[in-house]
Amino acid sequence: MTSRIVPKKYPMPEQDPKERIRNFREVPLGQDPETVKLEAARCLQCRPPKGKIVPPCVEGCPVGIDIPGFLALTREGRFEEAIALIKEKNALPAICGRVCPYENQCEGACTLGKKYEPVGIGRVERFLADWERARGFRVPARPPPTGKRVAVVGSGPAGLTAAAELARRGHAVTIFEALHAPGGVLVYGIPEFRLPKEIVFAEVEYVKSLGVELKLDVVVGKTVTLEELRREHDAVFIGTGAGLPNFMRIPGENLNGIYSANEFLTRSNLMKAYLFPEYDTPTKVGRRVATIGAGNVAMDCARTALRLGAEESYIVYRRSRAEMPARKEEIQRAEEEGVKFLLLTLPKRYIGDERGWVREVECVRMELGEPDESGRRRPVEIPGSEFRLQVDTVVVAIGQSPNPLVPATTPGLKTSRWGTILADEEGRTSLEGVWAGGDITTGEATVILAMGAGKRAAASIHEYLSGKPWPSDWKPVNA
Amino acid sequence: MFKILSKKFLCPTVAKFEIEAPLIARKARAGQFVILRIDERGERIPLTLNDWSEERGTITVVALEAGATTKRLLSLREGEYLMDVVGPLGRPAEVERYGTVVCVGGGVGIACIYPEVRAFKAAGNYVISIIGSRTKDLLMFEEEIRGLSDELYVTTDDGSYGQKGFVSDVLRRLIEEGRKLDLVVAVGPVPMMKVVAEVTRPHGIKTIVSLNPIMVDGTGMCGCCRVEVGGKTRFACVDGPEFDAHQVDFDLLAARNRRYLEEERRALERLKEGRA
Ligand SMILES: Cc1cc2nc3c(=O)[nH]c(=O)nc-3n(C[C@H](O)[C@H](O)[C@H](O)COP(=O)(O)OP(=O)(O)OC[C@H]3O[C@@H](n4cnc5c(N)ncnc54)[C@H](O)[C@@H]3O)c2cc1C
Ligand code: SF4
Ligand code: FES
């Protein structure tokens, strides 16, 4: 390659931590076109390594975006072509450009990253998507209708992607969503300061512009059953996500002031409790807030707590820093904002006052022992190390399980012992004409994996609607 | 958008709404509820179904003015729209032929017990209904319930109508008289349901209550509605709202229902000052 190596990413301006913990606006402020062109020009335009068909970054991307391709176009300022190239593989780039764990995916695999900082692929994607949105989407021409009808259950990234892909192939698609707003975790879970809702709604509008019909306030399994949807449609896709909050089942967990992450985030994001009393839904955040867990969800809660007025916001995690599952970038931002980390610490019980409000959490210190089946060293309690932390609010962010509503009301729809819907590599379930994908088949995962599943299922649905027979030897891949 | 087809005040602080919601009407069963949201800024509140008509494509709910949201709800007029109505949520009442079933309704709980009276009667039970309110003006659905019940007892706390006292007094008397009761179903304020549970417990009479915790989504996603039943945490919106009264931790429920009192007061004050 002719271009000179630039060892570091071009910086992206951010809101100052002291400032941003007092508002819910997005933290990174985006880049200007000239900087983005320079960032794209850092790319070495690698060839596929021996024995591979794509360069490392593309291999690292769960949906296989032509990364060197869109970077080359971006470098030349051909933004419109660059975003079109991304959209061939990814219908929701403004979202992925913000929440994808690129450091484990494309950027983690980038050749440049071996010695220097990888190309800032995520921020280029983000810029291109924002650039396109600011100019207004071009509504693609609609293909002739096939006369086939598909129902999509759930409007998270899996459902939205499946719907868009099917509509683009001329099928009549209706999405059924339980909540009053579309987007799944993107609207109720991920906070405004990380993913502005305006962006999610713009992407939803784009999906609707493809001809997709959106029916809100419909709980499948309650308002209509999956069986009814099957009767009225030629195929059904289930993308109901992993919405069931886990609790630790320790004493005192139902005291007032203890939230699940889902409730805490839903109140703030979906219901806009941070604007109470302007909006009707309240939330209550005391001076000292402890969030249990150290994934992305936990970081979102700890940072939301600061913005809702907490003076001290703690992350309480039973393992050490190295095992924290959250993205590095999010951990770093949380630290910059003043979130304190109580590592190797396990809550044992909550202690409340006479009115039923949580006041203290009793914790025990942990040390790392032998590796467990996940390869991470198992935390073990240090006897006698119990101590109490004063808290006014606790957020339990230790994970979500698959939403059981649809399987529980659909005879014949098989699930694993973790409650995920069983599906084969194309997303086909145990019921003919029914596909599933996203967190409901994998358990809690990522936006891009949910989109990938939606896309694969859509391709499979399209083949089925075009006459391909349902397999007689169905074998789930997630048993 | 969900159209309000009719609205009727049952007393100055309670109104009955018939709402166009054909999908919900098709599926509704006794004991289930809906969650509604008035407008873009509204909160999601659960209301038990009082009635429904598949033919008309409508559902009926009864709302008591308790906070800012219900106050605003009561100010809506016929022909206006609610932003969202979702349901039917929760598990339906387990309606079977038990023999003699006592249906107890207190306050607006009377509106919620009405469909159960109807369902238990239709299932071939001998239905004894006991309804009560603080005072005469707050009593509702008396005629409707009388028409469906084999026996009806009415109480008011202040004695302004029916028998003076509480619904639980009547229940206690029936038991003392040696009536054989096979099932008691009670809906009303937490203290009332707690007392009913205590009245039937020593006699081992199966007793079901419909719990009314604070909710957000109503689909099992948030855990806001958690209650303890038999020492286990359950989500009332999906595991309930009806539970075995003898297993319910009513004190926890009462404490949890006080979580937002302060915010409710603020919201109400703001509403009185005139909402922006
Ligand atoms: C707080 C938080 C932060 C996260 N941060 C990141 C991140 O930074 N990066 C990342 O890649 N991933 C992140 N994730 C994970 C990511 O959001 C999920 O993996 C992804 O959203 C899964 O998509 P999905 O379409 O499968 O399900 P969901 O997004 O969960 O959507 C499911 C939808 O189905 C609806 N639904 C459920 N049941 C029914 C029913 N019976 N009838 C009708 N509708 C129904 C739900 O209301 C919901 O709208 C985060 C998750 C959370 C909770
Ligand atoms: S691996 Fe990095 S340098 Fe190589 S093509 Fe991909 S983005 Fe460019
Ligand atoms: S109201 Fe959210 S889980 Fe019941």
Image: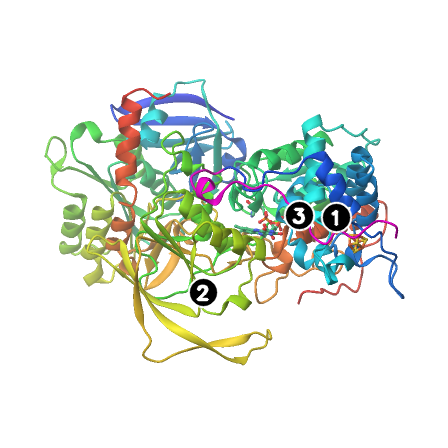
The residue beneath circle 2 is A317
Q: Position of residue B193 (x, y in %)?
A: 24, 49
Asked if disc 3 and disc 1 are in contact, CB closer than 8 Å, the reply is: no
Which is more toward the observer, B95 or A374? A374
> In front: A358, or A145?
A358
Number of numbered discs: 3
* Residue A146 at x, y percent in the picture: 82, 35
Relative to A241, B195 lies left or right: left
Give the residue pinned by disc 1: A455
Residue at 52% x, 26% y: name it: B1
| Mark 3 vs ligand 1: CB below 8 Å | yes
Residue A404 visible in image = no
> Judging from the image, what secondary structure is the residue with disc 2 in?
loop
Specify the subunit that label 1 lies on. Answer: A
Segment colored magenta = A1-24
Residue position marked by numbered label 3 in the rendering: A158
Amino acid type assigned to the residue bearing label 1 in the image: Lys
B53 up-or-down from B178: above or below: above
